[in-house]
Image (tube, rainbow, N blue to C red):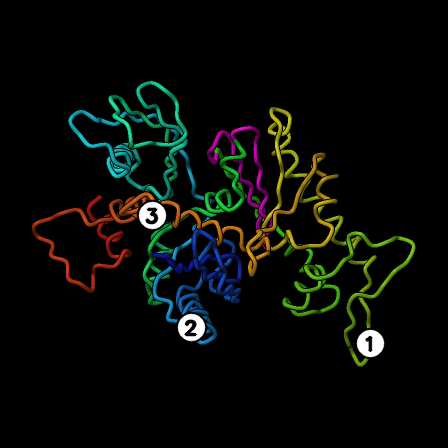
Amino acid sequence: MIQKEIYASIEFLQYEIRFTLGEFHNNRLNILNVETYPSNGIDKNNIINPELLINDIKAMIAVVNKKMFVNVEKVIVVLPSKSLSVNSKRITINVKDKKITHELVYDTIHNVATRELDSDRILVNATIYKYFIDGVSKSKLTLDKGINNLAVDVNLYSSDQATVFNYLNIVEQAGLEIIDICFDSIAMANEMAAFEASQIKNILNIRYELGQINLSLISGGRVVSTFSLEKGFVDIVEVLQADHHLSFEAASNLVLNNSYLNASNLESMPVFLYTSENETKAIEDIYLKDIATKILEKQFSEVYEIIDPILMSKETDVYITGKGAGIIGLSELLSNVLKTPVQVYLPEVIGARDSSYVALLGSLYNYRDTIKLGNESINQSCLSDEIRVKKDSKYERNESEDSMTNKLKELFKFN
């Protein structure tokens, strides 16, 4: 029987919510809908107006439901990697007198993580990158042969509980059930097939957004580290607003949707006309190029100082993603500033060929790939078990309290 699976994913960035709805059909992802919805409830990765953000989520989902004739009830939540920490471990699986299953491996990983994580942290993602079956290194676990000894190399990606709680609380108050959570750096690495590629060389993903530059280094099949700079293409937008009194939306569109970085210095062309004090004025490509180039060179010179040791230590492919990756000619400019080839990563999935949707797409793949292993995915196992209410004979839980957020509240209560 042909299986069809439809999943939704949601992500929060500065002043906007991003959403995608995708269907896996015969192992192929088809995009049914993508949305970018404005919201002043979030600034960078900080929720500054919970009530406004909740209402904006509801409004966006209403738009999706009306447009697609569906009723979205469940979502995957993409979390920012600002609070990510990674712990790589080799874990021995007790296989004596036990049937070897994926669930046995994942339960063992979960138990180890529960014991070793600090009390204020929670396991978000876990990835196995190597199996040792009877002393022999394998990339996959084969269950068709007898196994006497089994160990795994695993990456445990955790976040502080407060960050996870804040996001889950907002999403659930908007009336949505959460089926999985995933760090954006993990999700993007999945979409980009970076885990596989990083076995040979480093993969460096530079996510360029409105107010942030997020760096994630993938090496040896794992996300090794992440780093964020509190700057983005908003710096260019704000100059245009100050000089020409443009709206935020008009200035943003001007930055993202015009070819000016490659403009010839010999000939100037108008790219935007507007009226001010009954006078028609023009913004020319040379003006935009001068402003943007100075800001971009300054921003990414700082990035170069951070990544230069990485580039010197090992062959590294550098990609740029995020909404800012859509700036025409950006990769050529960054190749000069970073002194290494820089490629814009564009998803190949029809309907979402946009660098701003890389994390959302990757979260769909991440969820689908893990549930294929049988029963609960490791991500969902980590999610439900990590934040399950600790038993207490004096506490009785009713159905209304059985949401993921209330489970997390109880974890705070008993820790």
Mark 1 or mark 3, earlier in chain? 1
Q: How many angstroms separate mark 2 from mark 3 (CA)?
A: 25 Å
Q: Quadrant of residue 1?
A: bottom left
Q: Residue 65 carries which label?
A: 2
Task: Report the Cα–Cα distance between label 1 and label 2.
Answer: 42 Å
| Label 1 Cα crowd, 10 Å radius (few <14 / some 14-19 / many 20+) | few
Rendering coords of residue 263 (x, y %): 83, 54
Which residue lies under the disc numbered 3? 371
Work out whether residue 287 or residue 361 is closer to the camera in this orientation and state it.
361
Residue 296 x, y percent position in the rendering: 70, 47
Mark 3 surroundings: few (<14), some (14-19) or many (≥20) residues within 10 A: some
Q: Do the residues labelled 1 and 3 touch (CB within 8 Å)?
A: no
Picture disc at residue 280: 1
Specify whether 289 is left or right of 167. right
Magenta range is: 199-223
**Closer to the N terminus: mark 2 or mark 3?**
2
Q: Would you say residue 101 sits in the magenta stretch?
A: no
Residue 87 shows which numbered tag?
none
Left/right placement of residue 397 relative to residue 238 reads left
Residue that appears at 59% across and 53% down: 355
